[in-house]
Image (tube, rainbow, N blue to C red):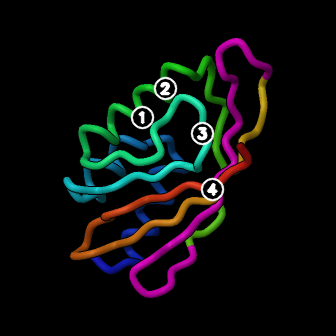
């Protein structure tokens, strides 16, 4: 698949809440995930699908209710793509809010090999 095809599939899966399917189908086994410095409760970098899945499970445990997501993009440049995400969520012990972040992905050999997230900390 081309970077554009991967980006489009990623956005489609995320818009429909199929995060696990996106990871299983589109991510390389040795993918790297990078969070913002100072992100509470998450390591700044994890490597490999087992670690990325564990990070996702940790995030799911923090969420009381997921109300929806808006994805703007993707925008492709070479073997990278980006998209903005607005997640309408209620985190356990907090009020409902919309979290906004920018995600940047790198694609090699038809798979996502890195993801990096930018958001207010």
What are the residue bounds of the magenta stretch? 75-95
Mark in the foreground, 1 or 4: 4
Query: What residue did someone put label 2 on?
Result: 60
Q: How crowded is mark 4: few (under 14 residues within 10 Å), some or many (20 or more)?
A: some
Which residue is painted at 34% across and 55% down in the image? 32
* Residue farthest top in this picture: 93
Q: Is residue 115 above or below residue 99?
A: below
Q: Element type at marker 2?
A: helix
Residue 105 in picture, x, y percent from top left: 45, 66
Magenta highlight on residue 91: yes
Q: Residue 56 — which label?
A: 1
CA–CA distance in space, label 1 to label 4: 16 Å
Pick whichever, 5 or 84, lies toward us: 84
**In the rendered image, which residue does mark 3 sit on?**
39
Question: Is there a contact, CB below 8 Å, between mark 3 and mark 4?
Answer: no
Q: To which residue does mark 4 refer? A: 118
Q: Which of marks 1 and 4 is nearer the N terminus?
A: 1
Whether residues under marks 2 and 1 lie with C-beta atoms below 8 angstroms apart, the answer is yes
């Amino acid at each position: 698949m081309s970077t554009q095809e991967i980006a489009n599939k990623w956005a489609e899966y995320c818009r429909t809440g199929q995060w696990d399917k996106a990871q299983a189908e589109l991510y390389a086994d040795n993918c790297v995930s990078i969070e913002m410095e100072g992100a509470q409760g998450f390591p700044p970098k994890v490597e490999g699908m087992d670690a990325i899945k564990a990070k996702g499970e940790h995030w799911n445990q923090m969420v009381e209710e997921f109300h929806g997501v808006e994805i703007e993009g993707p925008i492709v440049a070479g073997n990278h793509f980006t998209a903005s995400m607005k997640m309408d969520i209620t985190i356990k012990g907090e009020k409902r809010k919309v979290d906004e972040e920018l995600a940047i992905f790198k694609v090699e050999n038809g798979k996502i090999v890195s993801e990096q997230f930018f958001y207010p900390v």
